[in-house]
């Protein structure tokens, strides 16, 4: 099958390798470009833990940040691997923002010190608000912007030719961008027939009614790849 990979270029490498190992071809359709911010200021506090909901939250850290000494809680395997590669002793919990917030509420003590939340400008959920409601002192530092694509590029050409079998969508924002670009390029009818494999129900909800979509059993890459295997048997 030909699979459209919509992740930013920084995140797409391991996924495309897995798809190739499964026997699939890939067309790149990065819907977001990661732009690290300059002159980031991180308070020099004794953090109880760092919370990271994206691998880009680690990659965008400025040099000399001095944060590797603190416990680091990531949202899943990909962000954990990025943190480990950067020298952090990282753990993965929850699978998404809500799951990570639930883990922190259950396992950490609001009185044990502040939480540093490393994030992009736009997030799928409000981790800081959830932790604040539970009594935590959570300080959010925005490290990067995720800039939306202006065209579908090669993926648009493949979609126009009826060659794309499935699209992998990982966030409600990326689903909205995909939908908008499909409509902008006049490809709505063709896109409606393609299998849109979504990481969560919130992702699927960003697509138009009537589009072919399915939701993975859990919000992680292994689950969405299992869903791809299941979908491949019916395509």
Image: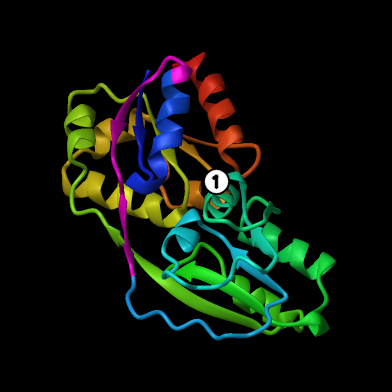
**Picture layout, residue 88 above or below residue 14:** below
Percent x, y of residue 207: 41, 47
Choose between 45 and 77: the one closer to the eye.
45
Of the 4 image quadrants, the one containing the C terminus is top left
**Picture layout, residue 178 above or below residue 235:** below
Q: Quadrant of the rendered structure where residue 52 is? A: bottom right
Residue 208 shows in this picture: no
Q: Is residue 33 magenta?
A: yes
SS for tag 1?
helix
Q: Quadrant of the rendered structure where residue 105 is? A: bottom right
Percent x, y of residue 180: 27, 52
Q: Which residue is mark 1?
A: 78
Residue ID at (39%, 36%): 13
**Picture layout, residue 6 above or below residue 52:** above
Of the 4 image quadrants, the one containing the N terminus is top left
- Left/right placement of residue 15 relative to residue 50 reads left
Choose between 21 and 29: the one closer to the eye.
21
Color scheme of the displayed model: rainbow
Magenta range is 21-36
Percent x, y of residue 79: 55, 52
Q: Quadrant of the rendered structure where residue 60 is? A: bottom left
**Picture layout, residue 26 above or below residue 112:** above
Choose between 199 and 162: the one closer to the eye.
199
């Amino acid at each position: 099958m030909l699979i459209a990979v919509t992740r930013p270029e920084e995140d797409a490498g391991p996924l495309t390798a897995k798809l190739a190992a499964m026997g699939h071809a890939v067309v790149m359709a990065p819907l977001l470009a990661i732009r690290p911010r300059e002159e980031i200021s991180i308070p020099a506090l004794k953090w109880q833990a760092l919370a990271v909901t994206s691998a880009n939250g680690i990659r965008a850290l400025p040099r000399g940040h001095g944060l590797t000494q603190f416990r680091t809680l990531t949202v899943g395997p990909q962000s954990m691997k990025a943190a480990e590669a950067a020298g952090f002793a990282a753990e993965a919990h929850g699978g998404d923002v809500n799951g990570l917030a639930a883990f922190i509420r259950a396992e950490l003590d609001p009185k044990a010190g502040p939480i540093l939340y490393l994030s992009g400008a736009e997030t799928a959920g409000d981790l800081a608000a959830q932790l604040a409601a539970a009594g935590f002192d959570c300080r959010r530092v925005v490290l990067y912007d995720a800039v939306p694509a202006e065209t579908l590029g090669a993926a648009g050409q493949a979609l126009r030719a009826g060659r794309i079998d499935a699209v992998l969508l990982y966030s409600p924002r990326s689903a909205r961008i995909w939908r908008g670009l499909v409509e902008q390029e006049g490809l709505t009818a063709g896109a409606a027939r393609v299998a849109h494999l979504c990481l969560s129900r919130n992702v699927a909800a960003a697509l138009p009614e009537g589009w072919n979509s399915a939701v993975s059993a859990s919000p992680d890459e292994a689950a969405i790849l299992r869903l791809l295997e299941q979908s491949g048997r019916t395509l």
